Image (cartoon, rainbow, N blue to C red):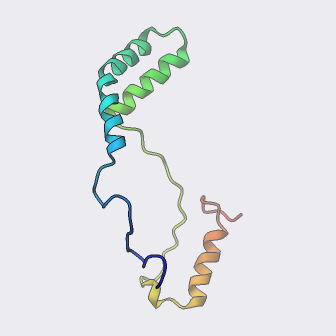
Amino acid sequence: MPRGSKPGERRGGRQKGTPNKATAEVKVLAQKYAPAAIEELGRLSTEAESEAARVAASKEILDRAYGKPMQPVAANVAMRDACTVDELSDAELEQIIIEGRATNGTGSRL
């Protein structure tokens, strides 16, 4: 009898889309304290003695109100002829891998 699962086959665990009960319970408990926590952050943002605490509290409030700011991402994307992986030769695939390993994420060579 073969062991393991086929690609894409799920065995055991929660079914897709089923919420984690433990996480849901913690979330409900934490939400009870959210109004008081936000109020305390508001107080700290204006009344804390240290400037670092005021900045941190202000940042937390802004992150919750407007979302965290987008992070810039450096990418080196070489435009190739549009094709699927199945259409590439082994040599072409190896070259793509080598080129990917030779960059450090900023587009410049290591």
Percent from the top left, x then y, of residue 60?
42, 27
Residue closest to the eye, 49 or 26 = 26
Quadrant position of residue 107? bottom right
Q: Quadrant of the C terminus?
A: bottom right
Give me the residue at 65% from left, 76% from top: 98
Q: Hey, which residue is sitting farthest front in the picture?
A: 1
Q: Is residue 97 left or right of residue 35?
A: right
Q: Is residue 10 above or below residue 86?
A: above
Give me the residue at 44% from left, 27% from top: 59
Percent from the top left, x then y, of residue 106?
60, 58
Quadrant position of residue 52? top right
Residue closest to the eye, 18 or 91 = 18
Give me the residue at 39% from left, 68% from top: 11
Quadrant position of residue 38? top left
Percent from the top left, x then y, of residue 82?
42, 82
Q: Is residue 92 left or right of residue 70?
A: right
Give me the residue at 47% from left, 46% from top: 71
Q: Is residue 29 left or right of residue 75?
A: left
Count of labels in the image: 0
Percent from the top left, x then y, of residue 46?
42, 11
Q: Hey, which residue is sitting farthest right in the picture?
A: 110
Residue closest to the eye, 105 or 64 = 64
Q: Is residue 92 above or below residue 53?
A: below
